[in-house]
Each structure stands twice: as C-alpha cells, then as structure tokens.
Image: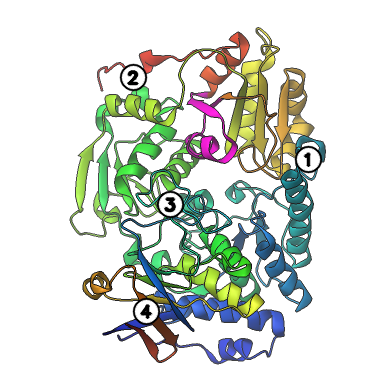
Amino acid sequence: MSRTQLILTADEARMLHGADGDGVALAMRVLVGLSRALGASRLVEITSAHVDSCLYHGKVSLDFANRLVELGGSVRVPTTLNVGSMDLLHPGLVRTKTDTEREVALKGRQLMSAYLALGCQATWTCAPYQLPGRPALGEHIAWAESNAIVFANSVLGARTDRYGDFLDICAAITGRAPFSGLQTDEARRGTAVFDCGALGRDFLQTELAYPLLGHYVGSVAGAENPVLVGIPTDVSEDRLKAFGAAAASSGGVAMFHVVGVTPEAATLEHALQGRPPQSTREVGREVLRATRAELSTFSSGRLDAVSVGTPHASYAECELLADLLREGPPIHRDVAFYLSTGRATLAQAEQSGVLRILESAGVTVVVDTCTYVTSILAPGLKNVMTNSAKWAHYAPGNINVDVVLGSVHECVASARLGHVALDNSLFVEGPP
Amino acid sequence: MMVQAEALTNGAAVGCTMRLTEPLSLWGGTDDSGRIVDPHHPQYGAVLVGRVLLMESGRGSSSSSSVLAEQIRSGAAPAAIVLARADGILVLGAIVAAELYGLAVPILVVEPQRHADIPGDLVVRVRASSSGGTITW
C-alpha cells in the first residue's frame, strides 16, 4: 500500500538525530512516528501547547515524563497544564483511604512535578482559554483535552487536531505538530447543519440550552463538524464552552461553527466553505427535554451533592454563583456543594471577595483537579446534581454516582431544599 | 494466504486472531488485565491478551494511548492490532511503549475489504516494518 512521504526540514532532521539533545530526539521520534501513521506530508510549527498527559493513568505516565526529564527535555513554546490527580492547594480534599487512592495521590503528585520540571506552567486547568495570552485566529497550536481542543478550534479559530496522550508534551518539546487533520483548511469545513431557530430566543437565552444542545449535537454529529444556525449573536463564551465540552464528550466533535458568532462562520456559506452540507436537521425543545432525561440517571428525591465547574468555572460563573448564594436560605446541611475552577480564577475570586461569599455559603472550591477524575466526593454521596453535560456523561462510570443535570439556578434551588427540584416549564414549546 | 498491509508501527508477532464486531475504546473499555469491561460492547468479557486483534477502528478517549502503553508494559496487551482505518491514538501508545520498554506491538492497516477476509480464531503471523506489513496464515 502506498503512503504519503513525510518530508522534514533540515532543522527537524537535525532534531531527530539528536542535535538538540536526547530529550528532543525522543520527542521527535514520537512525533515523526505519529505523523507517518497519519499520512502527514510535513510538520507544522506551533505557538503553544496544552498538556493533558499530566493526569495519572498508571506507571507508564510517570515513566514517560521522567524519561523526558532525565534526557534533559524542556518545552520550547509556552505550555499550559491540564488538571492533574491532586488539588495541590488543598491536598486534604483528595481521599487517601485505600491503597489505590494513596498510589494515585503519591504518583499523581510526582507526575505533576515532572511536568513542571519540563518547563510547563503550573496552570492546572482544563480551561486554558480563560488565561491571558490565548492563541489567535489561524495560529497553529498543539492542545490536548477534548474541551480545550474544541474551544480553541471553534471559538478562538486557532488550529489543533485531536491529540492523544504523550503527543502534547512531544509537540511542546519540539515546537512541532503533524500537519494533518484540523491543522489544514479542508478538515475545518462545517458539514452537519443544525437549525436552532425553532428553539426560540427565550429558550436560547437560558443556561441549560447549551449543555443539552451540545450533548444532542455531539451524539448525532459524531466526528463531523457541526454548524449551528439561529443562535443569538450575543451568546457568551461560557455557553459556547458548555456546548463544546458536551459535544466533545458525547461525540468526537473537535470543531463546530456558530453562524454569525465563531470566527470561521461569518455566514453559513463561509462555514460550509461554499459547498453543500452533508446533512441538515432542525432542533426542537422536545428533543432537548429527552436529552436531559437521557443524561440523568435519576430525576427526583434526595440530593447528596452538587458539582459545578466542569470545564473549570470562569470568573463570571463564580460571580453568578456567589450572587445566587449571597442571600436567601442556606444550603441544606446534608448537601455537599463543590465548585471546580482553575487556581488563577481562584486567586481572582479571593481578591474580589467572591470566594468569601462562596465559602460562607458552604461551597467547597476545588482547584488543580476535578471532582470526577479523582476521589473527592465522600463515599456515601450517591445522588449528585451538576450543570455540566460532560460531568453527567462521565461521572456515573468514573466515580459510581447517580447524576441529574440542571441549570445553576436549579442546582442552587435543589441544594437549598435537599432534594431535586427541576423546572420543566422551560421545555414547553412557545412562540419562536 | 497472505494480506499486504500498511505498517503504522514496526514489530512482529504470532498469535490467534480475535475479530471485534464493534470498535472499542481501550480507556474505559478494557481493564488492567486486558479484558473488555465496556458493558455495551457485544464482546463484553473477552480477553485480548496475546491475541491478534482485528478491529475496524479505535474509538473514544485520547487516554487510550496511555492505556495501551500500560497494557504493553504489564504484558496485558494484544500481540498485534490490525485495523481498517489508521488510528493515531493507538499508534501513540505503541510508540511510547517501544521507546520506554523496548516492547513492540505492531499496528497495521488493511483496506476494509481485505480486512474482512482475515479469518477469526486462527493463528497468524504478523510482520510490520518501514517497508510495509504482511499478515500470513
């Protein structure tokens, strides 16, 4: 069978043969091996990287990072780090009762240290696009972590393919990525059109519309590039974040377009690159009501915990939660309330006083990691509410809980009552 | 019989084939001992260790690279993987295991029609190098 020949520049060939040290040569071998397998004809220079491999998945994670450190590897582009397996600022939040929990806490912390030794920044967030200095339209980058990938491609218009574990740090060390997939113009074309106009403007102003729409669109579109039509042009980045994270979890969506909103979709024709779509669908409220039911494993009764902030809550989302909790009844004494965010946002919330309001209302703020990837929720907590479709999708399998999806308003109302209170009037069909 | 293939990673193996009737995500879909633990998968409970895995494509999480590398390290991986479509995630896992531990699991791509012709539950010989790959039985 024929295969596209990978052509390296003279510099890249020298890196592969060890001119910049053994760490660079190892990273280059991984990169070249993948590029050949993907049929890439060349590599592309990148301006930043985001590393997902800092989450502990067993001995190999640590062996690989330590090998790069021993060989003198060091990142050559600004490189942010995704969540790890520990909250380094609040280590007491992560349970260490069982052998497995102790191993993950110890090795997870060693893994996080190894990535710092490689010159990555201690950002520990799955939402690197909330940090200053984010990549611009058309910049080639190597970001891993599905929600970060889909946000960078779609909302920022930067270019990253779906990269697996290990490739992210190899790209950071070499400053290169395979020139294939979403790095190229062709792969960025919108293909599956979703007309959201019939949902109505009022519905599309609600928070809950976006995680539900994302989960539905992802499950239908798979690895296609969805194009949304009829979304209000003032839709916030936080809502696009919720949409993208959900679509990346339920399908393999790594790029979407919102006509009139995202930078490569000024018009529908622009998003489709002038070609006809492969499919067109209308989305109504009934299908999103069914999506909530599908994403939830229970829908009424006692509530043990609430977890919001997956992907990490932005400062605006922390502020909104503080506003909801500032006055009114306290959180029920039997309900634990978790907010996950990045440490940079935590610092901002501390400075502005928002953190004090959250903590005095009984909210536990988790940073550096997330409540569904490590042991944070107490073992007795079974019935959990979240405003994140991604959390709802993964938590039942990852940490063995039951889950119900609600807006942050429903989360707060339910936490106060101690039982689930959903507002299904939202889904009644109204005038568009 | 012999089928020509494209080699995504290098190596050689002899083993009994196992054909998966649906794609499988190794992360969340298999455990430390190489058993399929995804309850939605039609071959739930099957053990992939040492088998020549015939699977049209990979699926799901990008952490499947870590899972495959970890299984190769501990001896719980398939002996070889024969796909009908290239999969960068699995390739990364095999490349890293070869770099760290010198353990090679060949991953090959065979065009879909020929892929379907490879028999299940039969011992085959797999070779993959920079000049290409073959599966013989």
Between residue A397 and residue A222, name the one nearer to us. A397
B3 horizontally vs B76: left or right = left
Find the magenta span and give its range.
A384-407
Subunit that carries the residue with mark 1: A
Whether residue B89 is situated above or below residue A149 in the rendered picture? below
Q: Which residue is mark 3?
A: A154
**Does dot 3 land on a helix, a strand or a loop?**
helix
Q: Are marks 1 and 4 on the same chain?
A: no
Q: Earlier in the sequence, mark 3 or mark 1?
A: 1
Res. B95 in view: yes
Marks 2/3: CA distance? 27 Å
Subunit that carries the residue with mark 3: A
Residue A399: percent from the left, percent from the top? 59, 37
Marks 1/4: CA distance? 46 Å
The outermost residue toward the left is A276
Residue A359: percent from the left, percent from the top? 76, 23
Where residue B76 sits, quadrant-wise, is: bottom right
Q: Earlier in the sequence, mark 1 or mark 2?
A: 1
Q: Which residue is mark 4?
A: B124
Q: Which residue is mark 1?
A: A96
Badge 3: how crowded within 10 Å, few (<14), some, or many (20+)? many
Marks 1/2: CA distance? 43 Å
